[in-house]
Amino acid sequence: MKQSRKLKFLDLCFSFCFTIPCTSEQKIWHIFGVFVIYLVLLSVRFRIKGTTAVELASGLHWYIKYWCGAHISWDKTGGIQINSIPKPGSLPLVKDEGVVIQRPVPWNYYQNVVTSSYSYVWWNWERWEKEIDWMALQGINLPLAFTGQEAIWQKVFMNLNVSSEDLNDFFGGPAFLAWARMGNLHAWGGPLSQNWLDQQLSLQKQILSRMLELGMTPVLPSFSGNVPAALKKIFPSANITRLGDWNTVNKNPRWCCTYLLDPSDPLFVEIGEAFIRQQIKEYGDVTDIYNCDTFNENIPPTNDSDYISSLGAAVYKAMSKGDEDAVWLMQGWLFYSDSSFWKPPQMKALLHSVPFGKMIVLDLFADVKPIWRTSSQFYGTPYVWCMLHNFGGNIEMYGILDAISSGPIDAHISENSTMVGVGMCMEGIEHNPVVYELMSEMAFRSEKVRVLEWLRNYSRRRYGKAVNQVEAAWEILYRTIYNCTDGIADHNRDFIVKFPDWDPSLNSGSDTSKEDTKHIFLSLPRTRRFLFQQSSSKLPQAHLWYSTQEVVNALQLFLDAGNDLNRSLTYRYDLVDLTRQVLSKLANQVYIDAIIAFQRKDADALNLHSQKFLQLINDIDVLLASDDNFLLGTWLESAKELGVNPVEMKQYEWNARTQVTMWYDTTKTNQSQLHDYANKFWSGLLKDYYLPRASTYFDHLAKSLKENENFNIVGWREEWIAFSNKWQVSTELYPVKARGDALAISKALYKRYFG
């Protein structure tokens, strides 16, 4: 922060100017929606100055954080702490002559193309309104706006004589729309009712209206080539090919192998232009920035640079014919996930296929695998430094605070930098609030953050006071949980929620088929994910990157602070989350102990360890039930609330249950390749889904020892999959309100397992 000689008030200025001015105090009042914050504006003479409501809101946020010690996070991660804000008339003044804060780069991007399915899918306007206000407080000015696009596609394709029945086979169900949009699957979880299409279109108009009101630039979708199968019959001469399988169990064409219109075909530009124009007709001219990821996990048929260049040019032509000022925003994930294909010649061909300045690349995984370093800053193409952080919306305490606090700065000040923004591209939200608060601040920082000092301040703001024990705990968490530097892409593969689908008899010489063997260490596609770390003993190992004993010590410190902080919702969320983290890591070791007992044919030890594993699941479920933010019921009820009739309610609940469990298709004896990808530590899910699964598995192991037979993995899978199918279609109600005392439960569990 540099001092201003002219200003005698809090004056937040930003170097990048927007086109929609806003000076209304009422907008600031709405941003926060809390009466106390409105008093801030009335009780002391100071001014927050900016060119849009986003700038004003982020200025207000900065003031209440760093002068009033307040804290704002998602409701599901504890919500807000405003008790530390002084009463009206006693608000702290900014010292000296004021403060000027400038954005080092113009853009602050937000969302992943799959966040819409993992986190937003069941949101109504009330929840969206809160999120957009949260975005404004964080200074986000470039958010993705993907809601409701199926209604636009319906109009475009029906104008091309594609019927409603054909679109039923094209659109995915509500919880799987992201992957239907990307051409990974079709029809799974569908069809979409006209009620859904109309409802989502109306919601999108509300979302865009609020984004524009705050001065944000929404990023709208564009045409990537994904088309309904019927289009091949309607246009038989068009260059439409069928893609390969994407994660089905047996390449079932009912769900897989979608159709892609080649960008070189004239029909591609026609459809792309029609889609952009239809959006403008519905929403008005709200943006010039459009997302397209036509090659995301879909490799071009040849690596010929001229061909790739022609494809990129065609994609942009389809955008620019609909909007002459169009800018193509592209996820850079493909340069990591398919790095064996995208070598420098291919990358240059794609990135240089559009006029300079008409493409922005999201360096999607820069927090772990930055592409800007190895691509000569994307060969001169403007890019956004992004933190991916989360896959599948899993609940796992994880992060790399050092990379977040320094990565964007290193990129920005590097020689010949083409960085134009920072961004958050998590697959799912509402977890790890410390990570997202620090990352949001990087939009306004031009120097590296001293993380330990920042964490002390964060702890005091989050809980409303300084407590030595909890500050010491955060120091431990910083060097353990939030210091993952091993480069492994995926997290939260703990055995409770991602149960190993393998035959432990393999290590003792039993015969098994290749089909069984492939499930031992690999469940997800290509280089994108890692399920287990392989140890020298060939036992599955859940991902672990820190000393568990140190984190147990951090939990003890958190518990010691309970008397001071027990009334704090933010403290309670963190306590429950940390206790869950500690117990889930303990359960991983207990599982391994059970498997070793089985391999040694020690039935008593197998029974002892398996019962302890099951008890841990049950105990964690009780713990999670004590906080509103860890309940399965809220997810299911929010899905049903969007249904306007019993048929829709049942379909939406199936979508909600399936996404967080089996995810995709199965056969009678083979689980989905994506099973548990979107796993959640939610009360109700542990007790009624993960617990029966583990119990069934251990029963089969015990039977194998008792009868001196090989483990019947096929029989276990068949029994388990049948149970899962039944659970997915069930309609049992789950609580939406917490029960129990989180601190008392956590103390009891600590004493039971570590006392």
Image (spheres, rainbow, N blue to C red):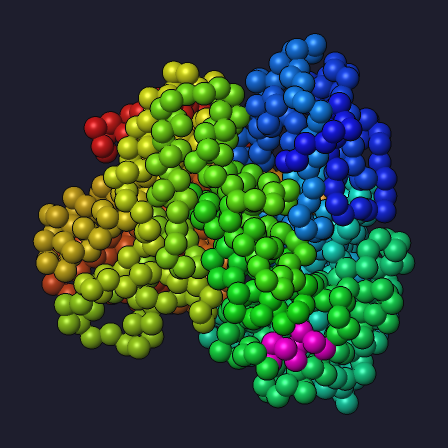
In the image, taking residue 410 as reference, residue 178 lies left or right, namely right
Quadrant position of the C terminus in the picture: top left
**Quadrant of image for the N terminus:** top right
Magenta stretch containing residue 445, yes or no?
A: no
Q: Residue at x 77, y 84 (%)?
A: 265
The residue depicted at 24 percent of the width and 62 percent of the height is 535
Position in image of residue 83 (x %, y %) = 57, 17
- The residue drawn where x is 72% and y is 47% is 141
x, y percentage for residue 604? 11, 48
The one of 256 and 669 positioned closer to us in this rendering: 256
- Along the viewing direction, whichever of 124 and 288 lies nearer the viewer: 288
In this rendering, would 528 be left or right of 274?
left
- Residue 89's place in the image compared with 604, above or below, is above
- For the point 23% across and 33% down, the residue is 753
Judging depth in this view, the residue of 256 and 310 nearest the camera is 310
Q: Is residue 350 magenta?
A: yes
Q: Which residues are magenta?
A: 346-353
Main SS of the magenta part reads helix
